[in-house]
Image (spheres, rainbow, N blue to C red):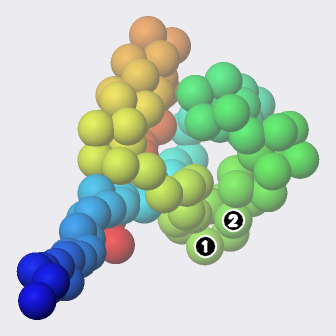
Amino acid sequence: MADQTTAKPKTQTKTQLKHPKQYQVLLHNDDFTPREFVVHVLEVVFHKGQEMAVQIMWQAHQHGVAVVGSYSLQEAETKVDKVHEMAQQEGYPLMFSLREL
C-alpha cells in the first residue's frame, strides 16, 4: 500500500490596508488679501496651474470659501502652515482651514 499524504489547503487572508484619512484644504475669502497673491500661493504651494488657481480664487471670492484640494493630514497641515507663513510675511490675513472627509 502506498503512503498517501494530503496537503492541507492554504488559507489566504486578505490584508486590508487602511488609507490615511483625507482632509480638504479650504480657502476663505477676505477683503484685504490681493487676488494676485492668492493666485500666487495656490500656484506655488498647491501646484495649481494659473487657470485653476484663478478659478479657486474666484470661487472663494464669490461664495466665501473654496475647496483647494484633498490631502493627507500631514500634507494638508504643511501646506496650510506654509501659506499662512507667506501671508504673514506680506502682512495679509489670508486664511486656509482643514475639513476632514
Report the front residue among 1 and 85: 1
Image coords of residue 7 (percent x, y): 16, 79
Q: Amino acid at mark 1?
A: His
Mark 1 to mark 2: distance in Å? Answer: 6 Å
Q: Is residue 89 visible?
A: yes
Name the image quarter holding residue 23: bottom left
Crowding at mark 2 (Cα within 10 Å: few <14, some 14-19, many 20+): some
Q: Position of residue 96 (x, y in %)?
A: 41, 46
- The answer to whether 16 appears left or right of 6 in the picture is right
Q: Residue at x 35, y 49 (%)?
A: 72
- Which of the pair 72/59 is nearer the observer? 72
SS at mark 1 in the image:
helix
The residue beneath circle 2 is 59
- Residue at the farthest right position: 51
* Residue 68 vertical placement versus 78 (above, below): below
Q: Position of residue 77 (x, y in %)?
A: 31, 38
Judging depth in this view, the residue of 42 and 92 nearest the camera is: 42
> Residue at the location (66% across, 60% down)?
61
Q: Amino acid at mark 2?
A: Gln
Q: Please tell me whether mark 2 sits on a helix, a strand or a loop.
A: helix
Q: Position of residue 16 (x, y in %)?
A: 25, 71
Q: Residue at x 70, y 56 (%)?
A: 56
Mark 1 in CB contact with mark 2 (< 8 angstroms):
yes
Instruction: Specify few, some or many for label 1: CA neighbours under 10 Å numbering under 14, 14-19, or 20 or more.
Output: few
Q: Which mark is residue 4?
A: none
Side (left or right) of 77 relative to 89: left
The disc label shown at residue 63, or none:
1
* Residue at left offset 57%, top offset 54%: 68
